[in-house]
Image (spheres, helix red, strand yellow):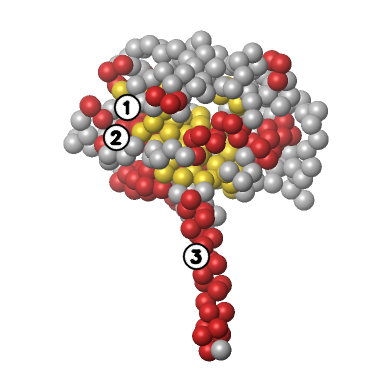
Amino acid sequence: MALISKLRKCLPEINKDLRLIRKRRSQALVFLTHIETERIYAHFLRLKNTTRGLLDVFLCVHEPTPHVDSAIRLRADFRISSRDEEQILPKRFAEKLERGGTITPGFPDLAYMPAIPSPRLSAYGHIWLMEYDVDYSGDWKDFFTPLVARQADLLATTILPRNLCPGWTHWRWVGVPIEVSPNHHICSFNPIVRFSRPMLNCYLESMQSGKWRGHTAALYATLASYNSLLIEDIGGLGPFTPPSMRALNYFNKVSANDIAMSPGTFVYAPVSHFDYFYEAPDHFSEHGYLHHPVKVAAKLSTVAVKGALVD
């Protein structure tokens, strides 16, 4: 009886440990927006609902960049303020102020990295970040299912070593420690990106040092390469694309000096669509691909969104 009594007392701790283990094996996705509308919330809900059981999806609103189209206040899991940026990444925040004080170009990490230390995310072994203007012409679960099994520390798109894009304008303001050789200089396109816990810890520690500066598109993969972390492209035809992922998920065109990456489904510019896939699937001629940028206007969605507003 005494043994049974001891086991009963241990059960809460055992269950807590099991929950942590399960979370370590699962993955989270943080959906980032600075625009609060019903259309964007419905886009978020499609992602959340279709990946249930595969990903835990969280809504993050970046408040320092309010948008004229914002019409409602959403039920967000995280709200990131300028104070959060400065508190979590003070040297990175100071760099942003030196370059004009805006998130773009180059500082999207400040819009979502302050959420990473949250207890709500601390148990996840891998965390995806996705911007509101990314869409997928198909079932999100079809996209994520093969990718959650990948062991890469950094999953991103359009990953290229510097020698393949030497004229890219943002190389000019990259600052890295002197011991980081040019062989480690790698850029990536990150409207959707996944980090392992070691990659996240490495990034946050490096940014705290003040020795790493520049556009996140140049920092993520360079930092991963220098620290011998595994880098993989989620599709396309680039040098970091695994054989099993080649020609999947997106396509674009890159050159030594061109950052637009057009034509393609996943580009920097021009705008690819003005409606989300859930609203106008017939507008997406290429199915089973990521699309970016999708810039939706402020008109109300025809899809009913319950619970979007904060009471």
Q: Eyeballing the image, is 12 above or below 37?
A: below
Numbered tag placed on residue 225 in the rendering: 2
Q: Position of residue 268 (x, y in %)?
A: 50, 19
Q: Residue at x 52, y 77 (%)?
A: 10
Q: Estimate the spatial distance between the alpha carbons at disc 3 and disc 1, rounded to whole Å.
A: 38 Å
Residue closer to the observer: 148 or 250: 148
Is label 3 or label 1 in front?
3
- Labels 3 and 1: the sequence-earlier one: 3
- The quadrant of the rendering that contains the N terminus is bottom right
Considering the numbered disc 1 on the image, is that residue within a helix, a strand or a loop? strand
* Quadrant of the rendered image containing residue 296: top right
The front one of 66 and 263 is 263
Q: Are marks 2 and 1 in contact (CB under 8 Å)?
A: yes
Q: Nearer the viewer, mark 3 or mark 2?
A: 3
In depth, the one of 73 and 115 nearer the eye is: 115
Q: Secondary structure at mark 3?
A: helix
Mark 3: amino acid? Asp
The residue to which callout 3 is attached is 17
Query: Badge 2: few (under 14), some or many (20 or more) residues near its Cα, within 10 Å?
Result: some
Residue 186 bears which disc, if any? 1
* Residue found 65% across the figure and 16% down from its top: 284
